[in-house]
Amino acid sequence: MKVFLVEDEFVVREGIKNNINWEAHGYDFCGEASDGEIAYSMIQKEQPDIVITDIKMPFMDGLQLSRLIKAEYPWIEIILLTGYEDFQYAREAIRIGVSCYLSKPISGDNLLKEVDAIAEKVEEKKQEREVALRYEAEMQERTELDKLEFFRSLLKGGRSFPELLEGAKKLGIDISGPCYNVVLLKLWSTRHDAFEYSGSVLDAETSIREIADKEGAIFFDLNVEGIALLFRGESEEKITESIKRSISAIEAVMSKYHNMRYFGGVGQCAGRITEIPDSFNWASRAYAHIYLTSDNGFLWGSEKELQPVNENLILSTIDPKHIDRRHIKEFLRRGDESETEVFLDEFFKGMGNNAIKSTMLRQYIAMDIYFCVADFVENDLGVDRDKLDEEMAVPTPEILADEDRTRDYLVETIRIAIGIRDNNYSGKYHDMVKDSLSYIEEHYAEDELSLNTLAAHVNFSPNHLSAVFKQETGQPFIKYLTDYRMEQAKRLLCTTSKKSNEIAMLVGYKDPHYFSYLFKKTQGVTTTQYRSGMQMEAAR
């Protein structure tokens, strides 16, 4: 524990420094200064745990120094020394948050006793900060789900500016502008099926989160849909520069992975927070090309055309002879129902703005999509063709004669296929969650158990597992695990005489301080109070 001394009298300073064997008592005497002005810059560098300072000093006195320290480093404890019995000084010291106010002269032994007492407080506060940080880290999954819900409300619109600010504040998100832009991004491993666990994807997503933090962008985990980055800035120019830097950094990260694909869509700059949905819509249009190309890259959404970031990514001029059924299949395998309309719009626009107006071409494309969907449901999903025919109508000449009716028919057809796909997976999801719950029951006592370790066990991506687990159980994984561990802890408190730190180890917490913190936070009482209450209840 680091101690720093500020004293203008040389003899007093030397006495305090040399008459106490700081190292033998577990302290690092990390520095000294003769006045507050010199001391402050040294304290900024050393960041000691305890500062001992005289009040009366030239240039900057001890009270002024204490105010500066507490403003920037509130966790540093301060001992004030004074030769004056002035209540005004003491009252001001208390107001600032000084730990101790001592009169000079003071012996080394008495000063050491005060330092030891304060050191205990410092250690307690350190432990409190550490467990609070661990709690925040463990609850990250829950936070990400709350952030996703907030992001969807941001895109949906209808909420006032003050409501959005309040919602962001609760999540610790700074959404101050005045300009915004949205980037949508997805990455996946070509070695794995959709939704499968991939350690490389996890590592890459962590790097992208760090890039976003560096640029001041807000990272939203959209689960199976990918990632959204919300950029904020003073002007469109600065946001665009920030996005370009981020894209370059992301491309550098992704170049390290030879078996991964990535694709992103960039929206248009919005001048106010309530216009973010417009930015998102442009990003979605660009992002829809993920299913229309086998290349990696980013597309920028614009009113004129969707421009690739580099000249090698040319998607804006697809003519009918290049129509590829694989694009439809890729969307059926990986796409989300909510993306269907945007995907089809971009699919047709890729063939030319008037492609859907051509009756012959429209009929050809519609029939091709119909047979592609039928093939996917029957051969990829293994679903009987009769079931598909019950839910999906065959395209009739009346439907195909009209541009809007054809579009609506194709949207509905693809949505039906995705619905069958998701229902087909639901049985697998149920089995996967059942397996997850069994794994938690067997391994809850292991401190290392986490969403990632569970995802690796059931071979699902953590994002997908998180979404499915909450859907099937009604709780995020981390809340379910915490509640399960707390129930086991309460059972042991009621049925055994084991100490709290022993019970902590038995229910998966190596750190007894963290277990005590978590128990009180979730149960509203300490372990001792809970045990006493149960004993009193049993006696009655």
Image (spheres, rainbow, N blue to C red):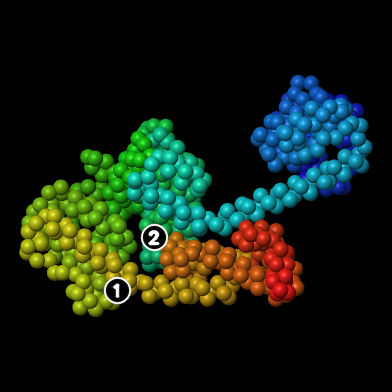
Q: Is residue 165 left or right of residue 139?
A: left
User: Quick one: quadrant of the C terminus?
Assistant: bottom right
The crowding category of the residue bearing disc 2, from other C-alpha atoms within 10 Å (few below 14, some 14 to 19, many at least 20), is many
Q: Distance between the residues labelled 2 and 1?
A: 19 Å
Which amino acid, mark 2? Val
In the depicted structure, whether residue 485 falls above or below residue 204: below
Q: Could you tell whether 269 is left or right of 166 in the image? A: left
**Residue 306 on image: x %, y %:** 26, 44
Res. 72 visible in picture: yes
At 77% across and 31% down in the image, what residue appears? 91
Mark 1 secondary-structure assignment: loop
Q: Nearer the viewer, residue 531 or 319?
A: 531
What is the quadrant of residue 375 in the picture? bottom left
285 displayed left or right of 231: left
The structure residue drawn at horizontal position 29% and vertical position 73%, both measured from the top left corner, is 381
Task: Give the residue number, with chain letter if any, for mark 2.
Answer: 224
Q: Find residue 381 and name its label.
A: 1
Label 2's element?
helix
Q: Which amino acid does label 1 sit on?
A: Leu
Query: Which quarter of the rendering shows the N terminus?
Result: top right
Q: Please tell me the numbered disc located at residue 167.
A: none
